[in-house]
Amino acid sequence: MKASSTGYGPAVMRAMENLLPEDKKLFEDPYSEKFLSPFWKFWVILMRSPKILNSLIKIREKLTPGVIGGLICRTRYIDDVLSNAIKEGAGTVVNLGAGMDTRAFRIPGIENIQYFELDFPELQKVKRAYIDKSIGELPPNVSLVPVDFNSQDIGEELQKAGYTLSSQTLFIWEGVTQYISREAVDNTLKYVARAAAGSRIVFTYVLKSFIDGSHIPDGLNSLYKLTLNKKKLLWFCGFEPAEIRDYLSQYSLHLIEDVGHEEYLERYIKPKGRDLTVFEIERTVLAEVK
C-alpha cells in the first residue's frame, strides 16, 4: 500500500453529504470539511449552493455511476456498527488506515472509547495539522499511531501506543484491502483474530471479478482503467462473496454479515427517497472473533 491522498476522496464525499437537507442525508459529518486541502475546501464551499451540489452529484454519477452511493452507504453502515459497539460495551476502537476519517470526533459516545488511528506518518502529520488548526486539540482518548504498512508490524506499533489485545475491540478497516497484497490482508486478519473473544472487525473489499477484469459493470471502465492500469496498479486484492465465510473461518472469525449494493439501497437510499445508484463492486463485512 502506498502513502497517498486516497483519504481525501471519501472525505470530500462525506462533506458533500453533510450539505444535504436533514431529511435526505445519511449521516452528520461537520468535520470532514475541516480536513480538506484548500482546493477541495473551495469546492465544498461552492457546493453549499444546492444547485451546484446537485449538478456535481449528477455529473459524478454519470462519469462513475454508483461511486458516491457506495461510499456514503458504507460510511453509514460502519457508523452504525460503531454506534452499536459503543452501546454493547466495546472498550477500544482500532481504525486501520484511517485517512481523513472523522468518527473519532463525531460519533455520539466515542469520547468514552479508547480510539487508535493507524496510518502512514506523512498522512497523519497532515491530519494532525488540520486537527490543531480547526478543532484545537486531539481528544485525550484518541491516539494517532504512525505506521508504514509496508515495513512495520501493526501489532508492535499498537502495543507501543498502549493497545492491549485483551480489550474488547472493534477494528475498522475501510477502503484499504484492495490497495494491499493478499498476504498483507491475511496477516492483518491473523492479528485481529488474537483479540479478545467477541471483538469485531468491519472491513470493505472489492470484488475479485473487477480486480481481474472478468466483470466490469457498465459505466465503470474509467474506474477500472484508473485503479488497474498495468503500468501503475493501485488495486491488487479482491474477494468474492461466496468465499468470504470460509476465508474468515481460517482465522477463527465468524461472519456476521456481508452487505453490498442491494442491502444499501434497501436500508439507506430508498427510505430517504434518494435518486442515487450504488456500485456493486465493493462490499462490507462484519465479523466476530470466536
Image (tube, grey):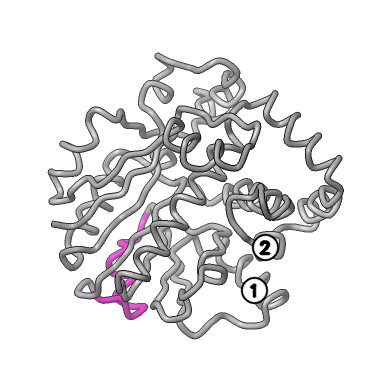
Q: Secondary structure at mark 2?
A: helix
In the rendered structure, does residue 158 fall within the stretch colored magenta? Answer: yes
Quarter of the figure with residue 226: top right
Residues marked 1 and 2 touching at CB (< 8 Å): yes
Q: Residue at x 42, y 36 (%)?
A: 263
Quarter of the figure with residue 290: bottom left
Asked if 22 appears above or below 140 in the picture, the reply is: above
Tell me the number on the disc at residue 131: 1
Specify start and end residues of the magenta stretch as a single range.
151-164
User: As shown in the figure, which amino acid type bears the numbered disc 2?
Assistant: Phe
Sequence-first tag of 1 and 2: 2
Q: Residue at x 28, y 66 (%)?
A: 155
Quarter of the figure with residue 41: bottom right
Closest to the observer, 137 or 184: 137
Q: Secondary structure at mark 1?
A: helix
Q: Residue at x 64, y 50 (%)?
A: 25
Distance Cα–Cα, label 1 vs label 2: 8 Å
Report whether 209 appears left or right of 2.
left
Residue identified by numbered label 2: 35
